Image (cartoon, rainbow, N blue to C red):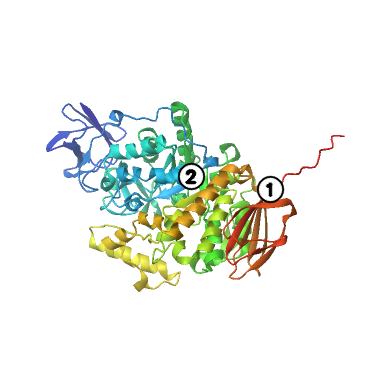
Amino acid sequence: MHTFRVWAPFPKNVQVQVGKEIFPMTADADGWWTAGIAQANPGDDYGFILDGAGPFPDPRSPSQPEGVHKLSRLVDHHKFKWNDQHWQAPPLASAVIYELHLGTFTPEGTFLSAIQKLDHLVELGITHVELMPVNEFSGNRGWGYDGVDLFAPHHAYGIPDDLKKLVDACHARGLAAILDVVYNHLGPSGNYLAKFAPYFTKKYSSPWGEGLNFDDADNAEVRRFFCDNTLMWLRDYHFDGLRLDAVHAICDHSAQPFLEQLGLEVKALSAQLGRHFVLIPESDLNDPRLLWTRERGGFGLDAQWSDDFHHALHTVLTGEKSGYYSDYGTLANLSKALKQAFVYDGCFSSHRRRLHGRSPEGLSGHRFLAYLQNHDQIGNRAKGDRTSQLLSPGKLKIGAALVLTSPFIPMIFQGEEWAANTPFFYFTDYAEPELARGVREGRCREFAAFGWKPEDTTDPQAIETFNRSKLKWAELSQPVHAQLFDWHQKLIRLRRQEPALSDGRMNNVKVTYDEKKGWLVLERDGIIVACNFGSSDRRIPLDMSKSEMILASEPDIDGVNGINFPAESVAIFKQKKSTAPKNFF
């Protein structure tokens, strides 16, 4: 016996099809339709018929084994046997996060094959694994940000139990699991929600069409839909937290915004289950209110991505100044990012041609994620080129050192730890020719702002684009890649060993630099990180009488009254403890 329920106030008649049989459903005053079917069991396929049209997938479908346009499949979440009963995620403040894309992380591109690589992450020193979206989207390959069946794991990655096995395997190795979800829009292919109910509103528009209805008429069930989606991933799939994609694109002027409601409901679930959960929004608004407590007038979320840090570091290392990178490119920018995450904290942005951001004063560095690479900053390049294709090994080591010694939560993108040579492209698998053509043309228009030519743009629809994005794990055995892996390991180990590197206190961060000579020194409570970004040797004025070098990217960094740094090198020093007797009188 299974009771089918669907919120569908738009149609006048709703039926449920189970297998090949069709059954009537009964409506209540709130637009919910129900039907109890004695012969329906987990594993059965079903869909809803709306005023004679359909069947359409369930908006809350737990599984779409044949894709976004076919029937849904019943899943019993209670049947899976978990082995993580005593699991508790490490604190986010001590995290080193690893972002990965299921389809390209392994040759097979499945939930189960990813389990085979988890020991590599443990060896590296990772604490949290962040999966790019795994909800059902159109076709067999994609990034997942165009999902339409938000409750269903993508069929090409495996069945729902396979995803649970992956999370269970993470926990068995001491790895927390974070899932990327998209609550600012739905994908264009297989999006049937508008046939059921007012999930969308004409009040707002977005690059993907009408905005989601978080604050217009009949919005209560829409908000319930997305809150329930979050609670399902945390409760039924045992994820330890969610990354919330592009929350700046959520339009909501409610007295209690959706994001605040979401945070409260996650806290309630945490209290109920006795497990710690985190919500990590992505936003380009530089608005600390996402992280402020509710008592202060904020949303009470846990941490957010810091694109300002990325842009400041990326532009200093690469010299790129096109598109939104035009707002960055100086050591002064990087210094400010290291000290407070936001470069734009209410000051004028020439790229945006307006004042941008607000000061994050009072917030800990533990509330921000720092990274040199992520899926966006690689995949949204015409050639999908990583920093390993843009930078020398020396500069890669500088970038890694500043990420992993910053006061923020460090994040690494798959393959970055060994300077993978494989690109990471944007790829799709739309069956609709017009949609496929629109994606191709849209990418070319977007890339024009960076000066990239259309002929340099790969075809997102081509299977080769997807296959070329897959990691080549054999690279790890090659000397140059092994050396970069070793460097990342040592930096992560150092971050664990030195309390100053994980305390998150931004008021303890000091930065000095010489814009002309191209050097920068980061100091954090007795730990000194000195970087020579230049293409020639530099003498950096450091007093070494009270410090010792504990890690260096090059063997010939030396000196007494100032340190001689080879081109594109970095070294980390620790102040020696005073041995003088203390005077207690």
Nearer to the camera, 299 or 155: 155
Q: Amino acid at mark 1?
A: Gly
Pick the front one: 148 or 329: 329
Of 152 and 432, the residue lying toward us:
152
| Amino acid at dot 2 | Gly
Q: Is residue 172 visible?
A: yes
Residue 100, position in %: x, y?
40, 50
276 relative to 454 in the view: left or right: right
| 1 or 2: tag closer to the N-terminus | 2
Q: Quadrant of residue 74?
A: top left
* Residue at the spot of label 1: 526
Residue lying at the far left of the rendered structure: 20
Residue 230: percent from the left, percent from the top? 40, 38
Q: Locate residue 119, reporting x and y percent.
A: 40, 43
On the image, which quarter does residue 237 sit in? top left
Q: Viewed as shown, does residue 265 lie left or right of 409?
A: left
Q: Secondary structure at mark 2?
A: loop
Nearer to the camera, 283 or 394: 394
Q: Is residue 218 left or right of residue 262?
A: left
Q: Residue at x 59, y 65 (%)?
A: 533
- How many labels sit on residues? 2
Q: What residue sits right under mark 2 in the picture?
A: 125
